[in-house]
Amino acid sequence: MLLPEQTASDSDFLRNIAVLNESNILYMMKKLFSLIAALVLSFMTARADEGMWLPYALNGQNLAEMQAMGCKLTAEQIFSFNQPSIKDAIVQFGGGCTGEIISPEGLLLTNHHCGLSYVQKHSSVEHDYLTDGFWAKSKGEELPNAGLSVLFLNKVEDVTEAVLKGVTAQTTEAEREDLIAMNARALRDDRKGDRKVRVEIVPFYSGNQYILFEYDEYKDVRLVCCPPWGIGKFGADTDNWTWPRHKGDFNIFRVYTAPDGSPAEYSKDNIPMKSKWYLPINLGGVKPGDYAMILGYPGSTDRYSTSYTVKNVIEEEGPAIIDCRTTKLDNYRKHMDADQEVFIMYASKQASVSNYWKYYIGQVKQLKRNHVYEKRLAQEEDFMDWVNADPQRKAEYGDIFDGIAKKWDILDEIEKSFIYHREAGWNGGEAIAFSRRFMRINKMFEDKADKADIQAAAEQMKPQVETFFKDYSMPLDQDVTAALLGLFYKNISNDLMPSEILRIGVATNGDFSDYVAKAFEKSVFTDKARLEKWMQKPKALDKDPIFALAMNIIESYQTLYARYEEAQNLGNEGERLYMKGLMEMQSDRNFYPDANFTMRLTYGTVEPYKAADAINYSYYTTMDGVMAKYVPGNWEFDIPQDVRDLANRRDYGRYANENGELVVNFITTNDITGGNSGSPVIDGEGNLIGLAFDGNWEAMSGDLSFEQKVQRTICMDARYLLWCIEKVGKCDNIIKELVIK
């Protein structure tokens, strides 16, 4: 499932832009001769289905390709600030996914895994919406979700000149970053003013261009429908990132506004949104060659990175994350399988951890299989041949790999420890991670703040305490923490390890079980009653064993981070110039920017593929495949009785295809990544035909290199969506609200 876990504050995924090339000649050729345009497609430097395009900057080449593939929409119908368009139905959901409006009254469709954490918060053993599903039969039954918001894009502006003000050729990288941060902050504050909007300034093409995005943020988003686990999570970890797939990966929410239609916090007086645009649903189904368009918010790709990045992912980053998450998941499953209450508490957490655990397993494997490192080396050799052929180019680009090499000399040394600090250290055990939220209060003791101010600060933490302990199992966390600390000690060299972990590891020969058990018994962060007692009369936390360990890990991490920043400063200029040089060298290429959580459009077709020798996959799966995978009582492959009854009767109604099958999933050649989860799959006339939710195993290297022959987007068929709503959920109220063609 395509669910990014890292935000802009967690990683340097924000990548970069330049103005897309215009090709008016090609566009005119398409207008006059569609056949000629189709022939031109076969000679493009990049295939039509590769690319995450800025929808407001579609050029003649893009439009010609789209029209030749079956798109009947104009650029204005897809994206416009002057009139309602499809872009007005597309939202960034919850900060890490995509959603789309599908009714005049603000119904919002997204993936099951995108809304899973909110469903989990509403669930209990008595009301197990995770297992049984949730179906609101009226607007009055829809459930509010604290902390959930959606963003609608309302403005885009190139602000490169303003952001780079004061930056010269003599500016150091550190100075450059400071100037950019200062300029961007001032620009955001100026554009935002007192308005209730969100303003983001994002780098493109390795910092060669900066774009401002302005959003309306709606914070009253209510849960309407969630299918049972045996539909929405069917196949779970085993099927994740694979094809064939048989998953009903959807949730439905509704956006509410103030009575005047403006964005508002939750209120019982709020009303359903009057949608500016919504997507009708096409019941016609799909066949090979059908046009498919996806709009959404892909999170992060690194398609223009150097061979150094690829080598590091294969040798350092990927294996380290896999090791840490395997250990974490093993302990999760032990406790979740033994206790249904724990299963409910940790369902969303487990899904989040396992998603990118399997992603990295696949990515490392496919980077090797697809020879991506070797391809990057060849590209860099071609680049340097081009550079050395011209004295002026040699003066500008001749030594850029010197700084890049120095950057990776440092990162190769510290990367594994860097990851372990995050995955097994301060973000490994839950109590350790939670204790970090109290750093501000402890700092107040160090600064000898007024007792009343400290008490007030402690009182402000009460909602976070309630939220944390609602879904916290101390026995599970104790096992996870002990196992991860032991893994940390075993795999990281002494000089790159937090001193406290080193001290304990030496004293216990790497067995952290007793230490962690005693720490959990004493710490206020592992027991709600102890923490509430502390909050009544707060005192310094330095002697709390969990807090002290967290601070030691953070101190060690900060030391490493200083070296990380040093490395970035050494390589940033070279990587920025490399991107600029590539675009100059391949001036006839239509470059698309790397994903960075801004709205993108991708276009392709419905197509089968050959996965390997003698392995040829169809383009769709059916309910027959769901039933073939059924394993009674298995958390991954169990199916609710009512769903089995419907399938056994082949009670598919108008949602069956011409062969009497209920199509569950299909695949397209679209280019997507994490953050696209929940994106609509749209036909050539602007109708919803599916819901994107995953990529396929053979193309797990796709974030670094698009694999033309095998890369596919896995989609839930719109007919399966409607069947689940009508037949399983019995929500005729929702069916009546939709526009179905």
Image (tube, helix red, strand yellow):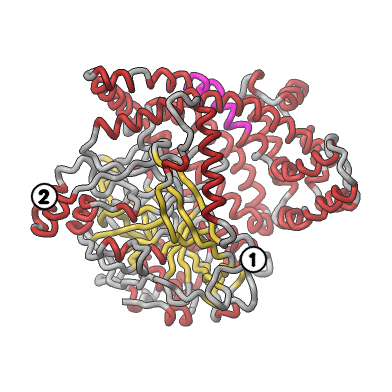
Residue at (33, 22) in percent of width and height: 396
The amino acid on which the numbered mark 2 sits, given as a three-letter code, is Leu
Provide the residue span drawn in magenta.
Answer: 408-421
Quarter of the image for residue 628 reads bottom left
Q: State yes or no: residue 417 in magenta.
A: yes
Asked which secondary structure carries label 2, the reply is helix
The amino acid on which the numbered mark 1 sits, given as a three-letter code, is His
Nearer to us of marks 2 and 1 is: 2
The majority secondary structure of the magenta stretch comes to helix
* Residue 244 is at least partly visible in this image: no
Instruction: Choose the circle earlier in sequence order: 2 or 1.
Output: 2
Q: Nearer the viewer, residue 228 or 268?
A: 268
Residue 207 location in percent, x, y? 43, 37
Looking at the image, residue 502 lies above or below residue 583: above
Q: How many numbered markers are drawn?
A: 2
User: Can you identify the residue that label 1 sits on?
Assistant: 122
